[in-house]
Amino acid sequence: MAAVLIVDDEVLIRWALRRYFEDRFEVLEAGDGSSALAQLERHDGKIVLGFVDLRLPDGDRKGLEILRVLKAHDPAAHAVVMTAFATPEMIEEAMAAGASAVIDKPFDLDAMGRMLDLHPPA
């Protein structure tokens, strides 16, 4: 089964996204960048969609590193960067690193659900 990786230090965001996607994907979670990178190594090539917070407890830009690693493992994987601190420069950098979209927090869960259109379940 294809997997979705949700990387956010906010437990409620991870919970909401898990609930939304768990009937269509295996859902993997990480509350910090180090845990996310470990998930990427353990599930190499299985993660088809990632939701990555830009700012994490172990680095303000750790989300961009995770995005780059996700895309290195699977260039076809889709990645959505979630942030409450979007700037035009950050959006440009995230898109250049391979993000499919940058979404402002707080977000509408149905808007996140539309990300399924980027990669239908296997």
Image (cartoon, rainbow, N blue to C red):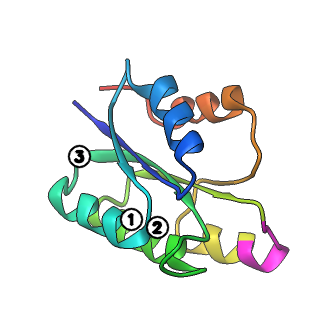
Left or right side of 12 for 27: left
- Image-quadrant location for residue 53: bottom right
Tell me residue 87's x, y (percent).
Answer: 83, 73
Left or right side of 76 for 98: right
In the displayed structure, 2 sits above or below 68; it is above
Tell me residue 31's x, y (percent).
Answer: 44, 58
Look at the image and tell me whether residue 72 can be seen. no
The N terminus is located in which quarter? top left
The secondary structure type at the circle numbered 1 is helix
Q: Please, what is the three-letter code of the amino acid marked with disc 3?
A: Lys
Q: Which of the marked residues, 3 or 2, is nearer the chain's N terminus?
A: 3
Which of the numbered marks, if any, corresponds to residue 44?
A: none
In the displayed structure, 77 sits above or below 62; it is above
- Image-quadrant location for residue 70: bottom left
Specify the segment rendered in magenta.
85-90
The secondary structure type at the circle numbered 3 is loop
User: Which residue sits at x=19%, y=57%?
Assistant: 44
Report the residue marked by disc 1: 71
Q: Please, what is the three-letter code of the amino acid marked with disc 1?
A: Lys
Report the residue marked by disc 2: 67
Tell me residue 75's x, y (percent).
Answer: 36, 60
Q: Which of the marked residues, 3 or 1, is nearer the chain's N terminus?
A: 3
Q: Please, what is the three-letter code of the amino acid marked with disc 2?
A: Leu
The question of residue 55 being in magenta is answered with no
User: Which residue sits at x=58%, y=54%?
Assistant: 100
User: Which residue sits at x=60%, y=74%?
Assistant: 96
Q: Nearer the viewer, residue 115 or 84?
A: 84
Tell me residue 119's x, y (percent).
Answer: 45, 35
Left or right side of 73 for 92: right
Report the residue marked by disc 3: 46
